[in-house]
Image (spheres, rainbow, N blue to C red):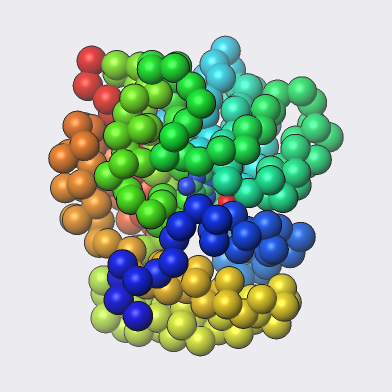
Amino acid sequence: MAKDELEKDPQTIRRLFDDISPTYDVLNHTLSMSIDVGWRKRTLKKLGVRDDETILDIASGTGDMALLANSLHGCRVIGVDLSGNMLKVATEKCSKKGDFYTAIEGDALHMPFDDGSFEKAMVAFGIRNMPDMAVFLKEANRVLRPGGKLAILEFSVPEYPVIRQLYLAYLTKILPFVGGLQSGNRGAYQYLSDSINRFPSPTSMEALYREQGFVVETSVPLTMGISHLYVLRRPS
Ligand SMILES: C[S@@+](CC[C@H](N)C(=O)[O-])C[C@H]1O[C@@H](n2cnc3c(N)ncnc32)[C@H](O)[C@@H]1O
């Protein structure tokens, strides 16, 4: 399947995440061996989250970024996601820790916020699902204030040959198999695997961010390049 043949229309993506929402957290932490927790903390630190602000969590899913942002930095969080079922899990988890999370069901390509509503936004493991990343970046730019920041955390494929081969074996064989077995939805995990495998390189992503008017403040590979953190700034 070619890169642009991956089915990314909103209905399909919503259904996919609605279906896997009950098993998403357990599988996510098992398959990533919880390495993602360190990546998430680093993302929040680089974004420079403060306790007096409300930050936007785009593609909020089951709310792991929101929970961590509140527990580490005390901020309030607005989470946007296509999948009502993922947001239901997020709301249940967050409400156990207090009243800091607002869930909004919606498309990241058309967010229900005025221009310049947020100082800080983040998207963790969500941008690769967007049907048109340029449109998404325009929209993220719009809802940020001038000088505001967007952190993007996303999987990537390592460049170092031996690590790359091992990682690709994991991604294309183990992930769809184990994910499929546990969730009963092999197609969903095949999609997750394909979408990671086909995601553009950091160099291409940086070029796209600049084309969309962002300044790339941080671009750093994490854990031998299996993930990548970008922090972008909307110029003042
Ligand atoms: C892999 S999950 C990541 C969830 C969460 N951010 C995390 O770190 O675990 C991707 C999420 O992106 C959401 N998503 C995909 N496309 C979207 C879009 N166009 N607008 C809003 N949410 C979207 C999915 O519904 C799903 O909850």
Residue 65 visible in the current orientation: no
- Considering depth in this image, is 108 or 210 the residue closer to the camera? 108
- Considering depth in this image, is 106 or 149 the residue closer to the camera? 106
What residue is at 32 percent from the left and 48 percent from the top?
133
User: How many discs mark residues in the rendered view?
Assistant: 0
Q: Is residue 18 above or below residue 94?
A: below
Q: Is residue 165 above or below residue 21?
A: below
The answer to whether 220 appears left or right of 11 in the picture is: left
Q: Quadrant of the N terminus?
A: bottom left
Find the residue positioned furthest to the right.
96
Q: Position of residue 101 (x, y in %)?
A: 69, 28
The answer to whether 176 appears left or right of 46 in the picture is: right
The answer to whether 150 appears left or right of 104 in the picture is: left
The answer to whether 39 appears left or right of 224 in the picture is: right
Q: Is residue 204 above or below residue 108?
A: below
- Considering depth in this image, is 73 or 24 the residue closer to the camera? 24
Corner quadrant of residue 35: bottom right
Q: Position of residue 33 (x, y in %)?
A: 61, 66
What residue is at 27 percent from the left and 62 percent from the top?
200
- Considering depth in this image, is 37 or 169 the residue closer to the camera? 169
Q: Is residue 148 above or below residue 13?
A: above
What residue is at 70 percent from the left and 82 percent from the top?
181
Q: Quadrant of the C terminus?
A: top left
Q: Position of residue 21 (x, y in %)?
A: 70, 58
What residue is at 37 percent from the left and 22 percent from the top?
144
Residue 71 visible in the current orientation: yes
Q: Position of residue 113 (x, y in %)?
A: 48, 22
Corner quadrant of residue 196: bottom left
